[in-house]
Image (cartoon, rainbow, N blue to C red):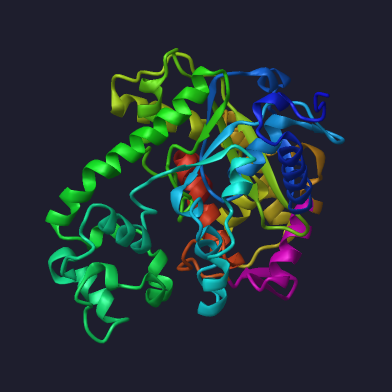
Amino acid sequence: MSFRWLQDPDDYEHPRLSWLIEITFALVLGCLFRVEDDVPKSYESARGCLLVSNHQRDSDAPLLGRLMFRRRGLHLRGPLPFFAMREDLYQREGLANLLSAGPPALVYLLSWIPLRWLFVNVRTYPMRRLREFTWHDTLRELQRVGLGDADPGDVFNARGRRELRQHFAALPKRVDAINPWKLRRMRVAYWGLRRLQPGALRRIAPGFRETVTQQLHFFARQLDAGHNVYFAPEGHISMDGRFGRVRAGTWRLGRMTAQPLRLLPFSISYDPLGPGRTRVVVSHGDPLDDMDFDDTRAFAQRLRRELMTHCAVTPSHLLAHFLSFRDTPFGVHELAAWMRHAVVRAREASIPVDPLFERVALDKLVDERVRWLGRKRLVWTTQGKWRRRWSPDTAPSWMHTRGMVRYLADSLSDFAPDYARALSQ
């Protein structure tokens, strides 16, 4: 009997398991995030499309997947896309890589818990990328190309040898004698190929490129078969809030499909500076049927423009921007008046704004948010006025609230630079 709670169950190897995992993801995400979206219902029936978005957090892809399969009770109404994921998480050590900051003994035990079965059942497949090719991956690849018996002094450059000496009293005599688990956290350090001599790189390069090509062909076959695929054009999470360089993978994928590729752009904006669950605003652009896959630069410029144009301004963006330039005392009503002016200017500039601004009185919203910032010790009050305690020199990060303020201020300055400069005057 057909399994009716999942769209296209025959396309899954284990449809009931896939349904269970997807339902669990949807419930967990619902507990962590409050999502507002303007995704039309016509997107539910879109087939053979490449979904693209800006990439700010690990939750981006699951949130988009949740929007596309549109849960109605226990039924998943829309098709789940195929997702591209960094290759090191797909390996047996994936869980250990995610939790590499933990105690070494625990990390080693976690390396025996595979996650591949989980990813396969939610249509998530590996995509090799230079940045996430770790030290461990590099050692594995050196042995694959026959350099396991080579002298590490001939294989690794000065940087690589220096890092090895931090964990070994003397360099091992052979590459395959290097135990990656003795490298501890350096085992998962990015840009592993940057530790190699040019000769070793030339040995690895052909197999590396072939693997990337095969992985892209896999996703191209899914598109030609009528499935949707999700790619983050930046290739990795933005570390500072700014949209990164568009990588070649999206462009190459468009040249591999048998049919002209249709792109569906989504823009994700977070609103974390407030009590309760983190709010997320997902906006969309018009489907792109006329992308130029012959000109790499023109393709990257247009894709970036499409994604940035639809990013919505949230209360957190405005609060972060206000704190980044205002060092004098302010009152709640003064900040609410400034934010009201900012929302009007955004609409005049055709910049999307968070729907929350239409539902909640700004004085009430600002009072709630400023008090929350006070509890987080980002502002403090004196003589009935609030004053900034947060330092503009704070580095952007999602790991703590102070870093989030910098991250969101930089993000606003990136997707709406003229607007952000005008607000600072």
Name the quadrant containing residue 162. bottom left
Farthest-out residue, right: 73
Q: How many marks?
A: 0
Q: Residue at x 50, y 44 (%)?
A: 85
Stretch of the chain drawn in magenta:
365-389
Q: Is residue 405 found left or right of 297 in the rendered image?
A: right
Residue at 26% across, 57% down: 142
Q: Is residue 284 magenta?
A: no
72 on left or right of 113: right
Which residue is more in the foreground, 385 or 145? 145
Please tell me whether residue 52 is drawn above or below residue 243 in the rendered image: above
Vertical relation: 317 (above or below) 77: below
Q: Is residue 103 visible?
A: no
* Residue depicted at x 47% and y 23%: 221
Residue 378 position in % (x across, y down) = 63, 70
Residue 305 in picture, x, y percent from top left: 44, 30
Q: Quadrant of residue 76?
A: top right
Is 63 located above or below residue 172 in the figure?
above
